[in-house]
Image: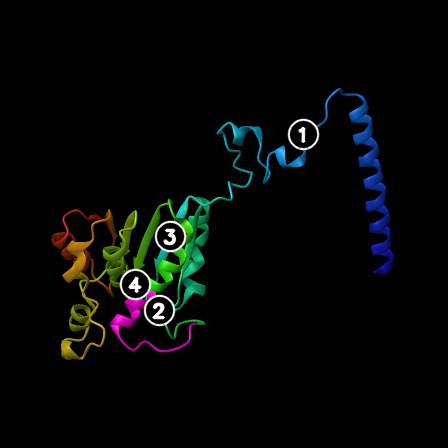
């Protein structure tokens, strides 16, 4: 290993000497100096990129276009829900996803619906300040759709996208377990009661194959907020 390291050092020093000699020769053959490094294209930028024709094999501009604030569903944690993160990366949007209390590496326990909403708002306020002047999209999937709807009312994002949304957890539980009194549901998360207050552009994504949260839930929400668009 030591011999390989020594050989690499010698090769590096030899390469540096050659580069210095080549630069000296180039300077002697020209009447002007090369611009300093900070004037050169950064981050592998090509002429095509500078002219607006991006080479797909070159990295995109590292400055994000905006933020996707994602409130995930009930099952699993961010390790599983971030499997599609490359989709947002390809669009040059940053992604923030938080685990609820007791999920993944988040400590504590969920004690109330108000606590869930407060946690989502704290996380949003923390990250949104870093994207001032850029669009922020709030995504809510399944369980997170109710939280996303409430958060959107409070902060007015560029767009709100609810995936597999429900009318309310109480209504959903009653449909799945009709023998359980609705009053026993600890976190009603009544999206239907507040969806009309969402003023940002609102997109609902749902499908007929969803057996846990029937698409009838999304259709009921569109009735309450006709400005919403449902994509089935």
Residue 37 vertical placement versus 162 (above, below) = above
For disc 1, the marked residue is 35
Q: Which of marks 4 and 1 is nearer the N terminus?
A: 1
* Mark toward the viewer: 3 or 4: 3
Location of residue 179 by image quarter: bottom left
* Mark toward the viewer: 1 or 3: 1
Q: Residue at position x 14%, y 57% from top?
A: 220
Tell me whether the residue at label 1 lies in contact with that at label 3, contact meaning CB atoms closer than 8 angstroms: no
Q: Residue at position x 16%, y 69% from top?
A: 171
Magenta highlight range: 106-120
Is residue 108 a member of the stretch shown in magenta?
A: yes
Is residue 183 a member of the stretch shown in magenta?
A: no
Q: Position of residue 208 (x, y in %)?
A: 22, 56
Give the residue furthest to the left.
223
* Mark toward the viewer: 1 or 2: 1
Secondary structure at badge 4 equals helix
Q: Earlier in the sequence, mark 1 or mark 2?
A: 1
Marks 4/1: CA distance?
52 Å
Q: Position of residue 202 (x, y in %)?
A: 23, 49
* Mark toward the viewer: 3 or 2: 3
For disc 3, the marked residue is 68
Marks 4/2: CA distance?
11 Å
Q: Where is residue 2 in the image (x, y as percent from the top left)?
A: 85, 60
- Name the image quarter holding the N terminus: bottom right
CA neighbours of label 2 inside 10 A, class few (<14), some (14 to 19), many (20+)? few
């Amino acid at each position: 290993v030591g011999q390989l390291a020594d050989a690499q050092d010698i090769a590096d020093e030899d390469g540096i000497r050659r580069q210095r000699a080549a630069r000296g020769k180039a300077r002697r053959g020209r009447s002007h100096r090369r611009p300093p490094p900070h004037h050169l294209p950064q981050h592998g930028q090509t002429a095509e990129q500078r002219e607006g024709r991006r080479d797909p094999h070159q990295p995109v501009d590292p400055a994000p276009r905006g933020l996707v604030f994602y409130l995930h569903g009930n099952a699993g944690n961010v390790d599983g829900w971030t499997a599609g993160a490359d989709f947002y990366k390809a669009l040059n949007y940053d992604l923030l996803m938080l685990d609820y209390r007791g999920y993944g590496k988040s400590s504590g326990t969920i004690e109330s619906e108000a606590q869930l909403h407060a946690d989502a708002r704290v996380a949003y306020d923390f990250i949104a300040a870093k994207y001032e002047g850029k669009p922020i999209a709030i995504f809510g999937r399944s369980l997170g759709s109710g939280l996303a709807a409430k958060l959107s009312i409070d902060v007015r994002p560029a767009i709100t996208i609810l995936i597999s949304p429900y009318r309310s957890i109480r209504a959903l539980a009653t449909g799945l377990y009709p023998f359980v009194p609705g009053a026993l549901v600890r976190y009603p998360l009544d999206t239907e009661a507040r969806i009309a207050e969402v003023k940002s552009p609102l997109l609902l994504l749902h499908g007929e194959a969803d057996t846990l949260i029937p698409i009838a839930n999304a259709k009921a929400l569109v009735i309450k907020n006709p400005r919403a668009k449902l994509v089935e």
